Image (cartoon, grey):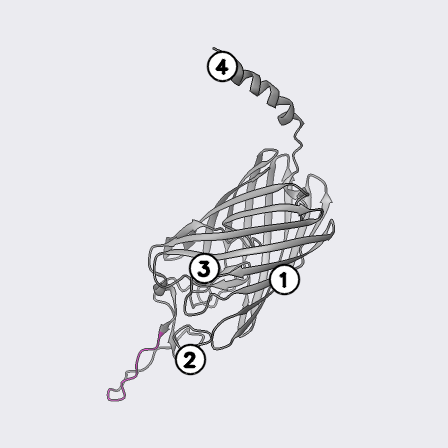
């Protein structure tokens, strides 16, 4: 009886706090967290690529504008200054080597009709991956423009760890710098990289509508090599920009984001991801959401709907 009274008393004491907590709607969230506030995000996803449904899944979303999917922790350290860290953990039904470029078929000069099959390869003398080559035809995956590959030694993958800092010059405009460190290697393709971004958000109607955008420059470095899939250039330069609109209605929210990016050096033609996010703020400091993304609407092979994924996530602020 005493225990029940204590529990009831605790609930009564908590009611004013819960009732007094004010919900900040998704469309009104600032680009930098307030000083002293912390947030944890957890994203789960599964690939629904044509011919490879459910082959890759785990902690990590990959929505068009989500630079820090997976397990993401962030905090407002100072006024207008935020720091955070994110990591992805994926599992694939096959080893990463099956998603990597392959060496060309050796030419047999003694037999007519035998030749090296290099169709679809970016580098002369290489063939596309054996499985799930993706919209770029070479097994490349992207996190908001950042290219990476699944490691070749196992079916479990850690890609990558990202540490970032963001400062807001104005409520609508900020500057972001991130260090991206790959956990697993794949012939040198997963490079340590820096991301420089300029986040922008404009609240058109408080509690109802806002727009957001962010252009990024990504610079990476790697050890060169002559092996299959190894980089031929030490430096790597890529660019990415996304823009979207967020609509809130009470606790529910909808976000539609479209991105565009490309590799400037070594050159790789542009790609066009798109995502739809639907969620609900259950409590003032707790959100749940689900999203569908198309990795590239202008793929090199196949249709824009062939490479897609489903994401589920939650975020808690404290």
> Can residue 110 be found in the magenta stretch?
yes
Residue position for label 2: 124
Magenta region, residue range: 103-111
- Residues packed near mark 4 inside 10 Å, few (<14), some (14 to 19) or many (20 plus): few
Sequence-wise first label, 3 or 1: 3
- Residues packed near mark 3 inside 10 Å, few (<14), some (14 to 19) or many (20 plus): some
Q: Nearer the viewer, residue 92 or 163?
A: 163
Residue position for label 1: 196
Residue in the picture at 64% in, 37% down: 249
Sequence-wise first label, 1 or 4: 4
- Between circles 1 and 4, the one closer to the viewer is 4
Cα separation, mark 4 vs mark 3, equals 49 Å
Cα separation, mark 3 vs mark 1, equals 21 Å
* x then y, percent, for residue 178: 59, 59
- Between circles 4 and 2, the one closer to the viewer is 4
Quarter of the image holding residue 110?
A: bottom left
193 vs 294: above or below:
below
Quarter of the image holding residue 151?
A: bottom left
118 vs 152: above or below:
below
- Between circles 1 and 2, the one closer to the viewer is 1
316 vs 69: above or below:
above
Residue position for label 4: 4
């Amino acid at each position: 009886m005493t225990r029940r009274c204590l529990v009831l008393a605790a609930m009564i004491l908590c009611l004013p706090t819960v009732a007094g907590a004010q919900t900040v709607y998704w469309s009104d969230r600032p680009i930098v967290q307030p000083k002293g506030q912390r947030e944890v995000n957890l994203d789960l996803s599964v690939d629904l690529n044509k011919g490879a449904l459910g082959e890759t899944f785990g902690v990590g979303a990959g929505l068009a504008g989500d630079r820090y999917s997976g397990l993401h922790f962030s905090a407002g350290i100072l006024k207008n200054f935020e720091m955070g860290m994110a990591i992805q953990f994926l599992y694939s039904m096959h080893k990463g080597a099956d998603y990597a470029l392959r060496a060309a078929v050796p030419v047999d000069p003694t037999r007519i009709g035998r030749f090296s099959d290099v169709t679809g390869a970016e580098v002369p003398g290489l063939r596309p991956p054996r499985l799930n080559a993706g919209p770029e035809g070479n097994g490349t995956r992207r996190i908001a423009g950042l290219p990476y590959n699944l490691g070749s030694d196992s079916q479990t993958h850690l890609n990558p760890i990202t540490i970032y800092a963001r400062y807001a010059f104005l409520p609508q405009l900020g500057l972001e710098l991130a260090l991206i460190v790959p956990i697993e290697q794949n012939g040198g393709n997963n490079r340590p990289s820096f991301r420089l971004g300029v986040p922008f958000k404009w609240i058109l109607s408080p509690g109802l509508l806002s727009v957001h955008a962010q252009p990024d420059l990504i610079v990476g470095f790697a050890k060169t090599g002559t092996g299959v899939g190894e980089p031929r250039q030490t430096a790597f330069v890529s660019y990415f920009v996304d823009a979207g609109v967020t609509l809130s209605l009470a606790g529910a929210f909808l976000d539609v984001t479209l991105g565009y990016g490309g590799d400037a050096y070594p050159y790789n033609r542009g790609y066009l991801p798109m995502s739809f996010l639907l969620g609900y703020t259950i409590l003032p400091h707790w959100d749940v959401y689900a999203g569908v993304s198309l990795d590239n609407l202008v793929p090199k092979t196949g249709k824009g709907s062939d490479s897609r994924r489903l994401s589920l996530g939650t975020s808690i602020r404290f």
